[in-house]
């Protein structure tokens, strides 16, 4: 039998305790994600392959739900802000919740038929991600962006389409302001 448990989440660091697993994504692992690959390679070589984000999860065998944190560093690659890979769920009937704890971000969403929506990620904003909307989070601030996500264990990730051609929009820095523009590569 699964037993209830309180899990402590640090909204400034993303620490989850207890956790059941974690991974880190560094810039060199996100080569397909950013447009300016020459600048990415330069950053990997000269800045020690910076961490872009870390995911920490709490998942119990036999449960229908799991949750965790994503903690994104601040930065950009040639003006394109640090972002996650972005994905649809394998299960098209399963959505997700993103609850921002700290920092400033943009949650970029795209429906299967190509509609774009944006939800600003600010502390206290709990974003509803409907089933079958691709989602990518982007740190547009100067500090860590930390959010809690809650999802069905069977949702799964489908990275294929987004890794291949990106999303229809990209979020770039223009004189310190975040601007959403058409993806020139799409
Ligand atoms: C999140 C994401 C996490 C990392 O847990 O998986 O923020 O983003 P990518 O998986 O797109 O690299 C989630 O949406 N899970 O379904
Ligand atoms: Zn997801």
Image (cartoon, rainbow, N blue to C red):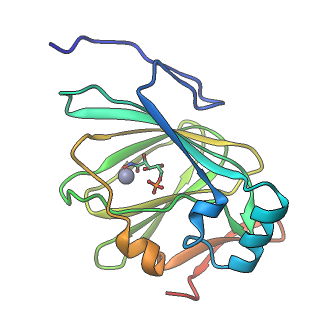
Instruction: Provide residue 38's location: percent of width, then percent of height.
Output: 74, 79
Report if residue 90 is visible in the image. Answer: yes
Residue located at (29% from left, 73% from top): 112
Residue 79 visible in the shown view: no
What residue sits 34% from the left and 12% below the top? 5
Of residues 38 and 147, the one nearer the viewer is: 38
Q: Position of residue 16 (x, y in %)?
A: 51, 24
- Which residue sits at x=35%, y=79%? 114
164 sits left or right of 5 in the view? right
Note whether 59 is above or below 134 in the view shown: above
| Residue 43 pos. (x, y %) | 79, 65
Q: Up-down: is 121 above or below 183?
A: above
Q: Quadrant of the N terminus?
A: top left
Q: Nearer the viewer, residue 82 or 169?
A: 82
Comparing 78 with 135, the one in front is 78
From the viewer's perspective, is 63 left or right of 27? Answer: left
**In which quarter of the view is residue 180 placed?**
bottom right
């Amino acid at each position: 039998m699964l037993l209830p448990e309180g899990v402590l989440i640090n909204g400034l660091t993303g620490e989850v305790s207890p956790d059941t697993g974690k991974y880190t994504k560094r810039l060199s692992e996100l080569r397909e994600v950013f447009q300016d690959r020459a600048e990415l390679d330069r950053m990997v070589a000269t800045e020690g392959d910076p961490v872009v984000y870390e995911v920490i999860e709490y998942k119990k065998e036999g449960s229908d739900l799991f949750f965790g944190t994503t903690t994104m560093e601040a930065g950009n690659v040639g003006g394109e802000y640090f972002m996650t890979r972005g994905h649809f769920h394998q299960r098209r009937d399963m959505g997700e919740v993103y609850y921002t704890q700290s920092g400033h971000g943009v949650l970029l969403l795209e429906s299967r038929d190509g509609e774009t929506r944006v939800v600003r990620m600010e502390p206290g904003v709990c974003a509803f991600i409907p089933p079958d909307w691709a989602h990518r989070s982007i740190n547009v601030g100067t500090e860590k962006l930390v959010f809690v996500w809650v999802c069905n264990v069977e949702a799964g990730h489908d990275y294929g389409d987004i890794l291949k051609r990106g999303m229809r929009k990209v979020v770039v820095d223009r004189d310190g302001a975040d601007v959403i523009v058409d993806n020139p590569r799409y």
